[in-house]
Amino acid sequence: MAVLLFLVLVAIGLPLLSGGRGGLGLFVSPSAGFLIGWPIAAFATGFIVEKWQGGPLAVVATVASVIGCIAVMYVFGITGLAIALDRSLIEATGLVAAFIPGDVIKAIMAGALTAALARARPASVLSRSGSANDVRV
């Protein structure tokens, strides 16, 4: 819901994106697929963390970030980029491929940070907040 609220604020023109960008025009730009995929990627990431209760939280959060924040986001982003620029999916993938290694590093950092947060404040990780003893990091 937070991501949807953020996108509504961007849509009404608040300059919240990089470079002080905002407004409805962004939703028909080459980056529109990434904007549309953003809440879906956030949902997918949270869904995986919530449903996969068996593993250590650092691993679960890292895998969820890779699947949700990279795979899901890039499916939408690359598709939107290909449509907006009238390019093939392979050409559009080539345009964003350089960002993938950095995104993988950020996914690993997100997993580690989530595990550290769960150790410090177990109730803050809502999908795992049964009790402090239930959180496996």
Image (cartoon, rainbow, N blue to C red):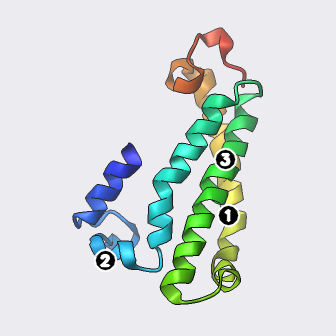
Q: What residue does disc 1 label?
A: 102
Give the camera-side residue of 46 and 118.
46
- Tell me where residue 61 sits by quadrant: top right
Q: What residue does disc 3 label?
A: 109
Q: Is residue 58 above or below residue 32?
A: above
Question: Along the horizontal axis of the image, is 92 left or right of 30?
Answer: right
Looking at the image, how many numbered discs can be counted on the residues? 3
Amino acid at circle 3: Met
Label 3 or label 1, whichever comes before in sequence order:
1
Secondary structure at badge 3 equals: helix
Question: Along the horizontal axis of the image, is 10 left or right of 40?
Answer: left
For the C terminus, give its image quadrant: top right
For the N terminus, give its image quadrant: top left
Query: Within 10 Å of the Cα at label 3, are there few (<14), some (14-19), or many (20+) other Cα atoms?
Result: some
Query: Within 10 Å of the Cα at label 1, are there few (<14), some (14-19), or many (20+) other Cα atoms?
Result: few
Q: Nearer the viewer, mark 3 or mark 2?
A: 2
The answer to whether residue 125 is seen in the rendering is no
Give the camera-side residue of 66 and 44.
44
Label 1 or label 2, whichever comes before in sequence order:
2
At a point 67% along the width and 78% down the height, the residue shown is 93
> How far from the left and from the top, in percent, is residue 48?
64, 38
At a point 69% along the width and 67% down the height, the residue shown is 100
Q: What residue does disc 2 label?
A: 25
